[in-house]
Amino acid sequence: MTFVSSSKTLKRSAFAGLLLACASGAALAAEPIPAVDAPDAAADALDGVVVTGVRGVRRTVADSPAPIDVISSEQLTATGKVGLKEVLNTLIPSFNLPGVNGGGTSWTVRAITLRGLNGDQALFLVNGKRRHTTSLINNLARVGRGGVPVDLDLIPASAIERIEVLRDGASAQYGSDAIAGVVNIILKKDTQGGAFSYTGGQNYLGDGDTRAASLNFGRALGDDGGFLQLAINWKNNEAASRAVPSRAQYLYQPTVTTVGGVTTVTPDPRDATADRYFWGASYGPGEEDIIATAYNAELPWRDLTLYSSGTVSHRSSKKVTGSFLPNLAPVTGVTAGRPLNRNSLPEVYPNGFNALRRIFELDWQTSFGARGEKAGWAWDASTTFAQDHAQLDGQNTLNATLGPDSPTYFHLSTHQFQQWTNNLDVTRSFEGVLPRPLQVSWGLEHRYERFLIEAGDEASYIVGDYVIPAGQPFAGLRPNPGLSSYAGTAPEDAGSATRHSYAAYLDVGTDLTENWYVGAAVRHERYTGDVGDTTSGKLTTRWEFLPGYALRATVSNGFRAPSLGQTVFATSTISGSLCPAAPNNAFRGAPCTPGEYLTFPTKVLRTDTAEAKALGASPLKPETSTNYSFGITAEPLPRLRLTLDAYQIDIDDRIVDTSNLDLSVTQLSSQPALVGLLARFPQGLTATYYTNAVSTRTTGIDFVAEYSFDLGSAGRLNLNAAYAFNKTKVRDVAQTPAILKAVNPNLVLFDRQKISDLTVGTPREKVVLGAVWSRGAVSASLRGTRYGEYTEAGTSVSLDRTYSPKWVADLDIAWDVRPNTNIAIGANNLFDQYPDKIGIVNADQGTLQYGLFSPFGITGGYYYARLTQRF
């Protein structure tokens, strides 16, 4: 069988050709798609061609000088997952998605990692055009904390033809963010037909019901191969929790009587019938409803090809907020939503409450462009507009400091991110310059970005003067300030920022001999504002030293510009306390009047504020990286393909948030440079800010093996195995600013817990074993995934929790009951696997027995059924 390469024709074994031809259905990181009885060789050959990681020409997966995974639309469906992030977590060994990970917006847009790096250190494309990031910063996450990733769940899976995952640094080719790799989502181009699919399922315990429907269809445009492809996905999943009953002794105020010197405590009768699971509802996924639409179109016109694609999506999410104990410290006191709590005003919530975080998000992106050829140069010009608008609300809560008249529904803030990208890409093959054709590509890019945070309702952040009246529990005390479990954005924390970036690149490549390819790329990018200029380069090579055996290697440097979210985001949480009686009448190091109610803030500070600068903050600068990759590909036997790639990624000046910097009145008063802060924070403050604080080295290997059997009348069997290992270590940590050391020698800019979250918070190892059997109208896929060990670090070694490796099995069985009708049943986490029960349990809420970081979730097994009708 013959295949098209960049500048030559390769002749290999029959199966090698078949394998390359079916590459999009045999992802390096997952099981191949069910084989058909009589594949079309020409169509399969085209399926084996990838467009990511090369400029101007197309290569097959095996010909690529850098490792590429290709995932087909059939594979996306066969996972049984209804969110794109969960699909990729299932199929790609180097991809990680923590099950819970934190509160706030961190569940709605869960942070991902790729090759051990944050999700915003990988670049995501749709049809080769940069995808915009979310407007929701992962401020309360532990893994991927502070990241502003692309929200993959807002791209409808029914619109996707395939996904190409380039596992290599590519900043010189694509620009900022492409340190860990590039994920290119290719949309369908069908000119006729389509499909409708409905999936329903639930967890083994009967909760977490999920319903999803999808529809896509295509039609021809014009008579010269134009098309219009439309798709829509709807997904609804209900909440699930894996909390144990609250262990609080009393949920309601007991009656205390003393008779004859004997004190008797009588529980409130409601304690006996109360739902003690109620306050653990935060421990697990929340409720979410997403409608995502997409279109993809091309129209040949004269000597041009006009094209456009885009997505429009809406999300409504609702999740109970609770104490996730980000420091994994032992729990004392009571939970804000319980009845026996000074913030659960009995006039408003006599039986307590669960505060809900509500997010309403409208997201869209559209690209317009044209391709053509002029004087032997193929050119592509495009413009892409995008916006993510998120409204953050609080429901079923109150600001108890305002008393019983407090609202119970609040608008907390509005986040918005806008991006406008313009590209010109030009390429040409030159004959006669070298012994073989020289491919030359160059291009220009302009990108405009704007990030905005608006303040919420005044009632969501002010502190009132309500005092709990006599006759109630906690009489005479003031409620804790702020809303339960979250805070509204105050005007002082609102803000916006804009910037432009301008880039130019040059990319060249050629086959020096029939079996030796070399390529080089360079890119210069200039940002407005404080970011400045950056230049990236990349060298690649591939040498086929024997038929079917090749070595490949790359070396590059890259960068990631700080996101506007990291430069603008700020928030405040207010805490308060009464001044104690004499002689201990001091609050955070300063004398106070006994009985006086005092407050102090915990703030995330913008780096450009006077407060942050006084604490040692400086303008954020780009993260820079150096990437090395070396691999071997082999086809030692017919129907057997092996790849092994090793890599090292050094990143300098990684952007992280600091440790909590706790500064009392006494400490602020001790330094002239900080005395000015007392005017704004007379009781002191606890602060963090984003900074370039750490340099890391990530090393790893990716191994893939694929084998296929023709079983004759018994059908076909495709087997594959994939193994990913990565290890991150901290090479350098920035010195704690001198001003902070002078205030408190114990302050550390970046503490051990945050270092541990970077280095051991995700599994270093992941194994995926897959088998797909097909015979006629029936197919079955079985996948086993082993997630390696990981650690959820505490504030001290004694609070660390290390979770052991786990195997998780997935099964999908499908049957074409009619030529165009398919039904399927399946199970994810077939054997109902859970993480170890070693978390530090929140006694009041009954949460955290499984920890937070589990890469396969904490809700156990899930079963589903799927109906697909093609037309």
Image (spheres, grey):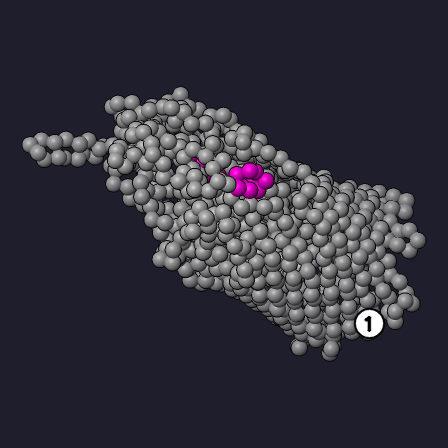
Give the structural element (helix, strand or loop) at label 1.
strand
Q: Is residue 342 above or below residue 426?
A: above
Horizontal relation, residue 604 to residue 832: left or right: right
Residue indicated by mark 1: 512
> Looking at the picture, does residue 288 appear above or below residue 166?
above
Q: Position of residue 781 (x, y in %)?
A: 56, 60
The amino acid type found where label 1 is placed reads Leu
The answer to whether residue 281 is seen in the rendering is: no
Looking at the rendering, the stretch of residues picked out in magenta corresponds to 600-614
Left or right of 810, for residue 644: right
Q: Residue 835 appears at what percent x and percent y?
A: 41, 56
Residue 224 position (above or below residue 93): above
> Which of 412/380 is in front?
412
Q: Is residue 654 visible?
A: yes
Q: Is residue 251 left or right of residue 5?
A: left
Foreground residue among 313 and 584: 584
Q: Is residue 604 magenta?
A: yes
State left or right for residue 772 relative to residue 757: right
